[in-house]
Image: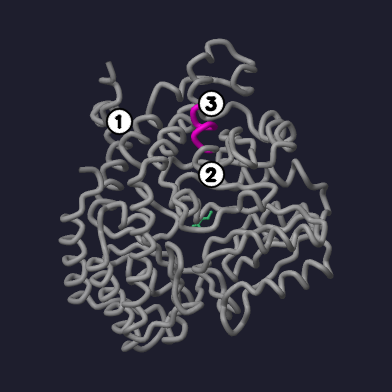
């Protein structure tokens, strides 16, 4: 029945495109993925993504579409919404029901949807500074959120490099923003959403929490939930949540009509029904008990990485981690994020350069490296493997440090040695068994 799903079809029809697929699969299988925002979707999630639902137009919402033939995609969309609300304990039977929108194409679209639904151009917003771990869509001047609204930022404390809620409160009191935004893409400690909610309430602002990075940890009960403290919660579905690439919105029920109408027809056209079915499949996986074990191991692995990395003199921003990521200050060793990212890439360890709080270098160079454990944990790796991986990263950094000049690279002999060890480890933990 599903013979057309076989990748061999692409191979026969279009060898050029097929070779992209096989090379990327090989890159993923033979290398270590430590980008904190990436993960491996299950074969079930990918089966839903690569399915006939991609053929269907379904503008509108379940039961109210602008196209015929939507009876089955309606079931899929309702399944995704119901499972999402169950995952975050905000279904109709909960104390604080939230509406769910699963049509947002991405986390950025989800955030845009909330802004357009609640704010007027020029309104004040207050979010975490991008170079302190925030996100582009939280008011960065190069993003629509910083162009359309009067964007202000809070920062982490210079000494602790952690959020300082008293300082955020003071800033919010003097600024009186219409919206406070919580959430980050490079912050290794837990958020106190209850406190942020109280600050927002005190200054008459609404609270948007973009939980994209920590959505899986929240679902597993291993990070405090933004619900019921936030008016709006947005997320991507492909990071710790381990679903397809996409976005979702949860909001207090009174915002249901506005949010839905802003996403469609305000911002998007036809929803990606294949992605929505894949979201339903991923939420179904996240509701299973083993998902909690996975998230617990993800945190343990990030902590094992941070302990081992710091043993050899690498400085950890904010001193450690409570979640799925570690932010390294390689600048403290006289290195740049750019050269460390490139050097690790050359030994099949994928990370990304990242600005650190109070950064002195440009975003293209940076003093930081962000390392995440979600993907390697999905492969089944545990603390012993994290020790091994950290030792290779330490080896690479020490080697670069011992060299003179700019844009240093790893010598061929060491490159071959680490690459071989990385490949051998990866072979023991296949992604798609
Ligand atoms: N670009 C994502 C990340 O890497 O964190 C956030 O959207």
Asked which secondary structure carries label 2, the reply is loop
Asked if residue 80 lies in the magenta stretch, the reply is: yes
Earlier residue among tags 1 and 3: 1
Residue at image location 61% in from the left, 66% down from the top: 130
Quarter occupied by the N terminus: top left
Foreground: disc 2 or disc 1: 2
Relative vertical location of residue 78 with respect to residue 307 in this rendering, above or below = above
The secondary structure that most of the magenta stretch takes on is helix
Which residue position holds label 3? Answer: 78
Earlier residue among tags 3 and 2: 3
Q: Residues within 10 Å of mark 2 (few under 14, many from 20)?
A: many
Foreground: disc 1 or disc 3: 3
Q: Nearer the viewer, residue 312 or 283?
A: 283
**Highlighted magenta segment, given as a residue range:** 77-84
Q: Judge from the rendering whether residue 172 lies leftward or rightward of residue 193; answer left or right.
A: right
> Residue 216, position in %: x, y?
45, 51
Asked which secondary structure carries label 3, the reply is helix
Alpha-carbon distance for marks 1 and 3?
36 Å
Residue 88 is tagged as 2
The image quarter in which residue 8 lies: top left
> Residue 262, position in %: x, y?
71, 35
Asked which secondary structure carries label 1, the reply is loop
Earlier residue among tags 2 and 1: 1
Residue 233 shows up from this direction: yes
């Amino acid at each position: 029945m599903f013979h057309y799903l076989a990748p061999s079809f692409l191979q026969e029809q279009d060898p050029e495109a097929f070779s992209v697929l096989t090379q990327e699969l090989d890159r993923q299988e033979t290398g270590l993925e430590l980008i904190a925002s990436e993960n491996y979707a299950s074969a079930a999630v990918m089966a839903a993504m690569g399915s006939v639902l991609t053929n269907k137009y379904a503008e509108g919402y379940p039961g109210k579409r602008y196209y015929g033939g939507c009876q089955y995609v309606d079931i899929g969309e309702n399944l995704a919404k119901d499972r999402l609300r169950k995952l975050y304990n905000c279904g109709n039977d909960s104390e604080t029901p939230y509406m769910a929108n699963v049509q947002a194409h991405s986390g950025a679209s989800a955030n845009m949807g909330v802004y357009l639904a609640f704010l007027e151009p020029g309104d004040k917003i207050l979010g975490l500074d991008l170079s302190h771990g925030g996100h582009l869509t939280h008011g960065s001047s190069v993003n629509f959120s910083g162009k359309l609204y009067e964007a202000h930022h809070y920062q982490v404390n210079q000494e602790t490099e952690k959020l300082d809620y008293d300082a955020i409160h003071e800033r919010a009191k003097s600024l009186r923003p219409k919206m406070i935004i919580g959430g980050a893409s490079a912050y290794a400690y837990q958020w106190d959403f209850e406190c942020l909610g109280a600050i927002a309430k005190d200054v008459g602002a609404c609270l948007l929490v973009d939980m994209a990075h920590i959505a899986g940890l929240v679902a597993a009960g291993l990070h405090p939930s933004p619900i019921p403290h936030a008016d709006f919660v947005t997320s991507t579905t492909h990071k710790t949540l381990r679903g397809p690439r996409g976005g979702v919105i949860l909001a207090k029920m009174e915002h249901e009509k506005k949010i839905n109408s802003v996403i469609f027809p305000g911002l998007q056209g036809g929803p990606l029904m294949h992605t929505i079915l894949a979201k339903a499949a991923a939420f179904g996986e996240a509701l299973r008990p083993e998902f909690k074990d996975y998230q617990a191991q993800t945190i343990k692995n990030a902590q094992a990485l941070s302990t081992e990395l710091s043993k050899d003199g690498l400085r950890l921003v904010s001193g450690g981690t409570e979640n799925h990521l570690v932010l390294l200050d390689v600048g403290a060793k006289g290195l740049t994020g750019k050269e460390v990212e490139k050097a690790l890439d050359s030994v099949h360890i994928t990370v990304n350069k990242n600005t650190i709080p109070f950064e002195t270098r440009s975003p293209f160079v940076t003093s930081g490296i962000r390392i995440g454990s979600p993907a390697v944990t999905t492969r089944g790796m545990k603390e012993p493997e994290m020790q091994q991986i950290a030792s290779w990263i330490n080896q690479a950094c020490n080697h670069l440090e011992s060299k003179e000049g700019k844009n240093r690279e790893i010598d061929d002999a060491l490159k071959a040695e680490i690459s071989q060890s990385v490949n051998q480890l990866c072979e023991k933990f296949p992604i798609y068994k």
